[in-house]
Image: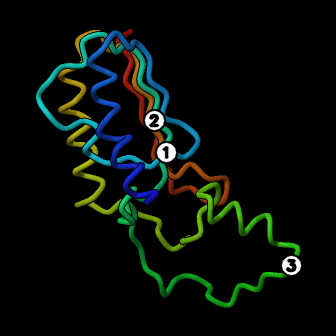
């Protein structure tokens, strides 16, 4: 059911952006997909877009890949690690540390869709995008577009 809710949200956001909405902040480890930018309709008033995304899509696919065998599978957790475990399950910490590289097919489709969407944002002044920006590694992606 949560996947359906995410899909509905991602299909609804473009409609909001076609209204008089000037700023959109998708933060707190948002699940996104290329669907967010699909279509041909413009985003006529959108000036600021901020996206803080996680490495996985709302339907369970991953934007990152890597070598699972490089992961130390013998990590031991105790009852004291409950909070950390909950944070990992909630997407606040990475729990697939071996996923260290953007998957060319998945991430490429997202970036292509985002670039096409930006072409339909005539008033865009600032776009900030980050994914997998965790303090546990240097595998995150951050890029910005600024009109100025």
Is residue 141 left or right of 44 when viewed as pictured? right
User: Which numbered disc covers residue 51?
Assistant: 2
Structural crowding at the residue carrying mark 2, measured as other residues with C-alpha within 10 Å and reported as few (<14), some (14–19) or many (≥20)? many
Q: Name the mark nearer the viewer: 2 or 1.
A: 1
Secondary element at tag 1? strand
Is residue 51 left or right of 104 when viewed as pictured? right
Give coordinates of residue 110: x percent, y percent. 27, 47
Secondary element at tag 3? helix
Structural crowding at the residue carrying mark 1, measured as other residues with C-alpha within 10 Å and reported as few (<14), some (14–19) or many (≥20)? some
Residue furthest to the right in view is 80
Question: Coloring scheme of the render?
Answer: rainbow
User: Which numbered disc covers residue 79?
Assistant: 3
Dividing the image into 4 quarters, which one contains the C terminus? top left
Tell me how far mark 2 sits from mark 1, CA to CA.
7 Å
User: Which numbered disc covers residue 30?
Assistant: 1
Going from N to C along the chain, the mark reached first, 3 or 1, is 1
């Amino acid at each position: 059911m949560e996947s359906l809710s995410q899909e509905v949200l991602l299909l609804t956001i473009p409609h909001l952006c076609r209204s008089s909405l000037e700023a959109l902040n998708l933060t707190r480890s948002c699940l996104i997909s290329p669907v967010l930018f699909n279509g041909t309709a413009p985003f006529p008033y959108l000036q600021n877009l901020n996206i803080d995304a996680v490495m996985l899509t709302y339907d369970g696919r991953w934007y990152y890949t890597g070598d699972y065998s490089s992961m130390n599978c013998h990590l031991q957790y105790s009852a004291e690690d409950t909070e950390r475990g909950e944070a990992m399950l909630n997407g606040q910490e990475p729990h697939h540390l071996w996923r260290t590289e953007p998957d060319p097919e998945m991430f490429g489709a997202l970036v292509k869709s985002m670039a096409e969407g930006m072409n339909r944002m005539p008033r865009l002044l600032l776009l900030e995008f980050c994914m997998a920006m965790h303090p546990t590694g240097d595998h995150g992606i951050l890029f910005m577009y600024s009109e100025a």
